[in-house]
Image: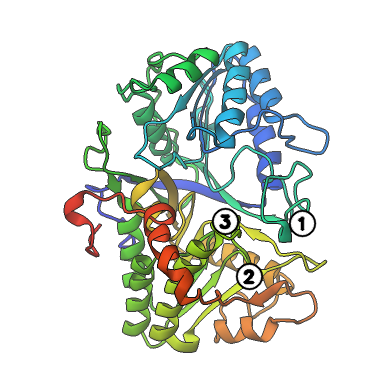
Amino acid sequence: MSDWFLPQTERPWSAGNLVVPHVHGSNYFARLIEVVGATDEGDRIFITDWRGDADERLTDTGPTVGELLCAAVERGVEVRALLWRSHRGKLNAEENTQLGTCLNAAGGEVLLDERVRRGGSHHQKLVVVRRKGRPQDDVAFVGGIDLCHGRRDDAAHHGDPQAPPLDERYGETPPWHDAIAEIRGPAVSHVLDTFSERWDDSTPLDHRNPYRAAVHRLARMPRHPDPLPERWDPPPDAGPHLVQILRTYPSKRPRYPFAPHGERSIARAYSRAFSRARRLIYIEDQYFWSDLVADALAEALRREPELRVIAVVPRFPEEDGRLGGPPMLYGQRLAFDALREAGGDRFAMFDIENAAGTPIYVHAKVCVVDDTWTTIGSDNLNLRSWTHDSEMTCAFVDPDGTLPRQLRSALWAEHLGLADEDPRLPDPSDPVGLWNERVGAPGSRIRRHEPPTVSARTRLWARPAYRIACDPDGRPRKLRGTTTF
């Protein structure tokens, strides 16, 4: 076992895996077409998602998400999915219902799942494909890319023609940066465990709520799912990588039978990795707002005088209106100030833009620590992701360190406008200096990012809004107000 991982008693881990990161939604969607398109009668596909759009085109000419999955059902593939039902009035509810209705009509089984803590969401994104009699071809995808509008962008970052609603400064087709991990080997079974535990939860999907019950009836979805088929044996070894699947579940009532007090293995795993960091922590994150999360990084900066921390975030919040923006900016400023105080110029934050100068929305959730321990998942670096919503991340270690370094170098090459073979990428002597040097350089996409300071008057309401709505605490009551997860 790698010392970077949580103990086996907390979360299982496995050796013998092959992890392939896919950066950009277009790359992931093309790979998904290959994997799902190869399935045949008797194979199985399992999906969880925050949002799925049946009409999202996976390439310029299709197929759409609905067409790809319905075609698999028609070939005799067993397709089951758990989609977040979303709160009343939210767009996800309508879109996920449409995808569920489409697949259920074709013969699949899709459930709208609202078994979350009040104000929370099911934010996990996974796809598991199992091949009957061909376990060596089993594959799982875990990461931040939903099967929905806005995600199909590529390295040029012109955005997905099917654009999501976003702050107008991102343009009509917002450029979108994202990542997901493809996993082969025994860890595929650990990914499937997460799906199975939620599927087998005996709590009614509508939980005695008349509105939810009506939504399920309209979508022809049962209150209780059909039992899952008998599990097949785990896939055989496929590569050199060690993998630990981490999750977040809130403490709630009725309780999750598989996590009666919630689960915070993501939070504990990050805390463990930050405590072991010595040289470099590189982060790409959609939000990066939490003083509690920042405290763990600040402690590492104070402990290790040679440690550098680089973070890449969106330039603007997704909804930077008069009410939505200030709480988000307040939270990010808390984190920024804590890290700048602890590390000085050893901490740096950046955002990115495309060649036309349009800011790129950073939706990726990637963390690389000392080019050794790496995560790609659905979780953001905030209290909501660490305690309140359902989340899932793939943490992996390559025994010879090749994969984490390759992933980080590839991301840096794109952002900094450097050639893939640039000798400064694999082992930079001054990583923060390299980033600062590339600000405004030809081909570079990076800009320094410093969250604006929220005025004292605005803080009067932004601070409680941030604590209650943006970054709520889903830990058991006895743990709230502490640094314990």
Q: Secondary structure at mark 3?
A: loop
Mark before the other along the chain sequence, 3 or 2:
2
Type of the residue with mark 3:
Ala
Q: Amino acid at mark 1?
A: Gly
Q: Position of residue 91 (x, y in %)?
A: 59, 36
For the point 54% across and 14% down, which residue is it? 218
| SS state under label 1 | loop
Q: Secondary structure at mark 2?
A: strand
Left/right placement of residue 300 relative to residue 26 reads left
Label 2 vs 1, first from the N-terminus: 1
- Could you give the CA–CA distance between mark 2 and mark 1, rounded to whole angstroms? 16 Å
Residue 176: x and y in percent read: 68, 54
Please name the residue shown 44% across and 13% down the image.
222
Tell me: residue 211, above or below residue 144: above
In the rendering, at what x and y percent does residue 378 appear? 49, 49
Residue 171 is labelled as 1
Q: Earlier in the sequence, mark 1 or mark 3?
A: 1
Q: Residues within 10 Å of mark 3 (few under 14, many from 20)?
A: many
Q: Classify mark 1: residues with Cα within 10 Å, few (<14), some (14-19) or many (20+).
A: some
Question: Which quadrant holds the N terminus?
Answer: bottom left
From the image, which quarter does the C terminus lie in? bottom left
Q: Which residue is mark 2?
A: 351
